[in-house]
Image (cartoon, rainbow, N blue to C red):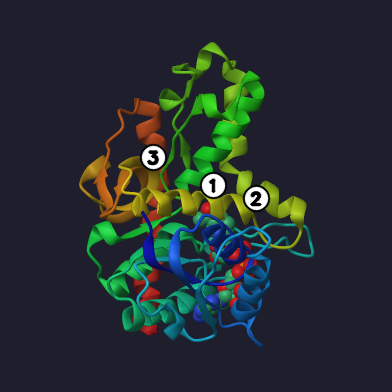
Amino acid sequence: MTINKLGLIGGGNIGGVLFAEAAKRRLAKRIGFMDIKPPDLAKGKALDIAEGAPTISTDIHYDAGKEFNVLEGSEIVINTAGVPRTKRPDGTIPTREELLQTNIKITKSVAEGIQKYCPDATIISIANPLDAIVYTLYKILQPPKNKLMGMAGQLDSGRYRYFVAQEAGVSVENVEALVLGGHGDNMVPIRSCCRVGGMPVEKFVSKEALEAIETRTRKAGGEVVGLMGIGSAFVSPAWAALDMAEAIIYDKNKIIATCALLEGEYGVNGLFVGVPAILNKDGVAKVIEADLNSAEKEALAKSVAGVRNTCDEVEAMLKTM
Ligand code: A3D
């Protein structure tokens, strides 16, 4: 199974990994790869990767360039266009929300490009602030709700799984975990849903260690930004988005923490928030309501309130654009 065309918007750090991996995994017969950066970042990166194709024994067919027309006919689009967080000269790290002013303008042009060249594509968006940028795409494009989603929960859950596996001394493959809510520092690691080899995580990791892991998970993006000094995590986000794309391409019915439109689930209406969802050929086929304890419900409500604030800013900004 494969699709005819995968569109990638943004050819920076995440976009480059997406192109290389999608080509290697033969996820689509053709890849559309777009970035506005001159002289022609997308074309340059695509050529580099295509010239490596004989070495990894794969055929790569692509359209790359600075204009949105290279996306024409894309069935799935992954959007990474937007500035990332970068450590400031004074050593502080901006919040994802501080990127909104810049990234909302970029998102508007991205939405126009999608509208013109692949209006029926299923969209997986990665640019930050994640939940608010997905909301912006929704407001402008008004797609069916199953065809628009954000990637964050899969990455955040992956970070939680990695830290738990390290602490428990087991393979990451043995750890199942779920991080829900908005993709900000108030995201909610759901301890009651964390399993190690099918058993409750508390059997393997102490309460104190779990608290430290959950705090680290909430700040894990910032930890990488601080260490790298130039931009934010880019390999793990690309792999997480490709996991979502594969669930759609291969019609897997896979449950993945996904930023999806809520219409009453978890008591939320009209916002995109990270929740477990079944992904298949239709995109977001179903949102799953996890059974949360009262502390988790409270933490989720707080995280959702943060998403609502940023989306209110989106509404105000869109009126002036
Ligand atoms: P970067 O390497 O800067 O790439 C972004 C690319 O977007 C650049 O090459 C720009 O030229 C390009 N771009 C800017 N404007 C446009 C436009 N109008 N049309 C097309 N391309 C454009 O950043 P990155 O790849 O590291 O990160 C991309 C985004 O993902 C940022 O907003 C990050 O904050 C975000 N991000 C999200 C996560 C999540 O888990 C949600 C994780 C890591 C990064």
Query: Which of marks 3 and 2 precedes in the sequence?
Result: 2
Q: Considering depth in this image, is 108 or 26 the residue closer to the camera?
A: 26
Amino acid type, mark 1? Asp
Q: Percent position (x, y) of residue 290?
A: 31, 32
Label 2's element?
Answer: helix
Query: In which quadrant is the N terminus drawn?
Result: bottom left
* Residue ID for mark 3: 300
What's under tag 2, amino acid-wise?
A: Gly
Residue 186 shows in this picture: no
For disc 1, the marked residue is 185
Q: How many angstroms separate mark 2 from mark 3 (CA)?
A: 21 Å
Q: Are marks 1 and 2 in contact (CB under 8 Å)?
A: yes
Image point (46%, 74%), residue name: 104
The residue at the point 49 percent across, 18 percent down is: 197
The answer to whether any part of residue 260 appears in the image is yes
Report the residue that reaches farthest toward the top. 203
